Amino acid sequence: MNKHFLFLAVVALGITLVCSCSVMEKAAVHDFNSGFYKLRLGSEKSKPVYLNVDDVAITAYPALGKLVNGQPILEFSLADTSAGNFYPLMFTKKSIDIDITSILFKYRFPKNGLPPELTTDFNAALYAGWRTDFYLLKRKKDPFNNYTYDLVNRGFDLGLFAGAGTTTIGPFSTGNVVGNEYNGMIAQAGIAGFLESKVASFGIATGFDYLLSNDRKHWIYNKKPWLGLIVGIALN
């Protein structure tokens, strides 16, 4: 049974690495594109809309679920540099987020009279969560009294991850039962929350590790919680 766990962990880790190579250059995956949003205009209450977004204009149509109803309620030209009336526009979008992730470090709590430990062993995992993006369209004036527009994007999400990695097994973490150190294979799982950017995302994670070797019964951190800093790259 343990050999089967080890085989599956190695396969999962290999797939994870292949996927990560294919998305390293996938920038701006959460750009502002046509789709369903919630629109807040100035101090008004948010309303569901479908946005048609192109290089020069944003057009908003009222939406009910996934249906588009009626005529546009907002037609806004990004090419307009005049000083006409303008109210900051806030668009909100919710989506499923799938990332390739790694825990940069894990803080392991004190155990059996031993001090806490900070580990940086290699690991990788797949993450799935529920993401919320906020897009704020603002206007600024240049020295020639022309106006340009900036779109500021902020996002966050919360979800689950699972994957594989390595950890150091030795006297410290086994109560001196294991005399020689080696790198053991682990399966890991937990929950994480991210602050998002266009490419990479950083957040806080908590989870547990399951050692796949027979020394798990001696390893003091087996299935014990830890806290860590997680980084992710979007797959979708």
Image (cartoon, rainbow, N blue to C red):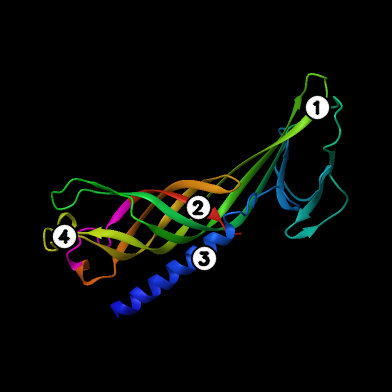
Q: Is residue 126 found inside the magenta-colored segment of the image?
A: no
User: Which numbered circle lies on residue 18?
Assistant: 3
Which mark is first along the chain, 2 or 4?
A: 4
**Residue 189 in picture, x, y percent from top left:** 38, 62
At 36% across and 56% down in the image, what residue appears? 207
The segment highlighted magenta reads 217-226
Which mark is first along the chain, 2 or 3?
A: 3
Q: CA distance from mark 4 to mark 2?
A: 31 Å
Q: Of discs 3 and 4, which sits in the foreground?
A: 3
Tell which residue pokes out farthest to the left in this image. Answer: 176
Looking at the rendered structure, the kind of residue marked 1 is: Tyr
Does residue 65 appear to the left or right of 228 in the view shown? right
Q: Of discs 3 and 1, which sits in the foreground?
A: 3
Q: CA distance from mark 1 to mark 4?
A: 65 Å
Residue 1 occupies quadrant: bottom left
Q: Residues within 10 Å of mark 4 (few under 14, many from 20)?
A: some
Q: Mark 1 sits on what residue? A: 147
Which mark is first along the chain, 4 or 1?
A: 1
At 76% across and 33% down in the image, what residue appears? 149
Q: Of discs 3 and 2, which sits in the foreground?
A: 3
Q: Are marks 1 and 2 in contact (CB under 8 Å)?
A: no
At 16% across and 62% down in the image, what residue appears? 180
User: Which numbered circle lies on residue 232?
Assistant: 2
Q: CA distance from mark 3 to mark 4?
A: 33 Å
Looking at the rendered structure, the kind of residue marked 3 is: Val
Q: Residues within 10 Å of mark 3 (few under 14, many from 20)?
A: few
